[in-house]
Image: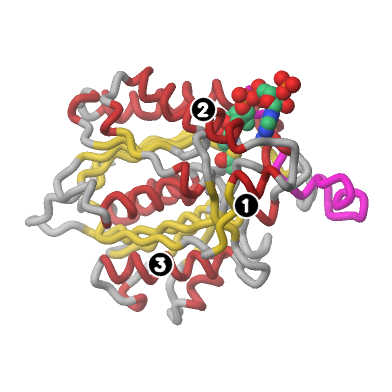
């Protein structure tokens, strides 16, 4: 498709709940150790939402921060897209709840269910709506409250997940802008659907006393299988956008991958042969927040001055589906 306009990231924001759950807290819940979690995952602590907080509450705070950094008001937004696997409700969408919280009406809002790359998928949609001239400013949010769908008797999964939200405003670029959404790539392979799944709560296995008793409403994951697919699928997603734009890895200033496991991040970095100093990591503070990991890391790195205007940032994620995707931008 020939783009009529270009898109850019005009502002970013994030929000995490105050409560911290660290590895030592987890030692009191399941048979694990700080040492195992740190060396096998790179995680030290993660945030936990309060019982009153739902995903839209976290998304709302992150959105306000993103709007502020884009110097826009909620009424300037034409579309809201939320990537999440832990929505407030199966329906209505968290994006609609967020629209109401932001006090705006008459703009479309919808969720994208694409596992951990939900924010990447949502960004890819936003990019196209701006490029074809349909919308000027789109709020793209990644949000999760995974701790409410985590089985705290399963040490294989419960040490991994945390809560948080990241948001970005995608806007039409002006001719003077250096910032640009360069490209994106999204993919899915449904044949791996059963290795990372919330088994109950949908039409396949509606909620019953039994599904609750058997913890089927929590994350089921075959970690080892995911691990190998993660590196392969993110490498592929990165390779495609680099090749399509005639860039080699040396042209990338920063790589932000899904923060699922430090060893996955390192393995991808090695496979890509990218300088370690260019790989952004915040897994030690927040654990795996699924579709929020990338926009949170992006916001933190921009706000701390690490990522600067003109830097080329490659982002890549993978997750339940199995899905994968990448987003290449100049900030
Ligand atoms: N504490 C102590 N021991 C543990 C723990 C724990 N928390 N969890 C597992 N173990 C044990 C296992 O029981 C096993 O013991 P055994 O050898 O006696 O059977 C041993 O550690 C090794 O288990 P593995 O599963 O082989 O450990 P691995 O090194 O693969 O690490 C992990 C497990 C962290 C889950 C890893 O496989 C992983 O990160 N996989 C990818 C997960 C992922 O990326 N998910 C992303 C999508 S999910 C999402 O984003 C929503």
**Residue placed most toward the observer, 134 or 311:** 311
As helix, strand or loop, the secondary structure at mark 3 comes to: helix
**Which numbered disc, 3 or 1, marks the residue closer to the eye?**
1
Q: CA distance from mark 2 to mark 3?
A: 29 Å
Residue 250 tag number = none
Instruction: Give the residues in magenta.
Output: 204-224
Q: Which residue is mark 1?
A: 146
Label 3: how many Cα within 10 Å (few below 14, some 14–19, many 20+): many
Q: Earlier in the sequence, mark 2 or mark 1?
A: 1
Q: Position of 209 compared to 15: left or right?
A: right
**Is the distance from the Cβ of mark 1 to the nearest ligand 1 atom less than 8 Å?**
yes
**Location of residue 326 (image quadrant):** top left
Tell me which residue sits at (48%, 73%) in the image: 99
Q: Is residue 282 left or right of residue 52?
A: left
Q: Nearer the viewer, residue 288 or 106?
A: 288
Please, what secondary structure does the residue beneath circle 1 have?
helix
Q: Residues within 10 Å of mark 2 (few under 14, many from 20)?
A: many
């Amino acid at each position: 498709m020939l783009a009529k306009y270009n898109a850019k990231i005009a502002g970013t924001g994030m929000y995490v709940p105050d409560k911290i759950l660290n590895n030592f807290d987890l030692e009191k819940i399941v048979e694990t150790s700080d040492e195992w979690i740190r060396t096998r995952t790179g995680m030290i602590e993660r945030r936990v939402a309060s019982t009153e907080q739902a995903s839209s509450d976290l998304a709302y705070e992150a959105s306000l921060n993103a709007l502020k950094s884009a110097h826009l008001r909620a009424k300037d937004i034409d579309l809201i897209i939320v990537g999440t696997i832990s929505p407030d409700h199966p329906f209505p969408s968290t994006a609609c709840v967020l629209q109401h919280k932001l006090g705006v009406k008459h703009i479309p809002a919808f969720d994208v269910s694409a596992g951990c790359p939900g924010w990447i998928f949502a960004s890819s949609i936003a990019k196209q709506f701006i490029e074809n001239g349909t919308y000027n400013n789109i709020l793209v949010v990644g949000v999760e409250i995974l701790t409410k769908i985590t089985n705290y008797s399963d040490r294989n999964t419960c040490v991994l997940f945390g809560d948080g939200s990241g948001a970005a405003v995608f806007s039409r670029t002006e001719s003077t802008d250096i910032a640009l959404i360069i490209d994106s790539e999204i993919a899915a392979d449904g044949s791996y659907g059963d290795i990372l799944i919330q088994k109950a709560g949908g039409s396949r296995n509606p909620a019953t006393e039994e599904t609750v008793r058997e913890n089927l409403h929590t994350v089921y994951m075959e970690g080892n299988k995911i691990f190998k697919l993660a590196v392969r699928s993110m490498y592929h997603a990165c390779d495609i956008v680099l090749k399509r734009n005639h860039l080699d890895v040396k042209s990338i200033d920063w790589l932000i991958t899904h923060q699922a496991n430090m060893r996955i991040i390192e393995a991808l970095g090695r496979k890509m042969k990218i300088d370690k100093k260019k790989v952004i990591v915040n897994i030690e503070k927040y654990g795996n927040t699924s579709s929020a990991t990338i926009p949170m890391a992006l916001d933190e790195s921009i706000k701390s001055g690490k990522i600067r205007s003109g830097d080329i940032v490659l982002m890549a994620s993978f997750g339940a589906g199995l899905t994968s995707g990448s987003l290449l931008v100049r900030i």
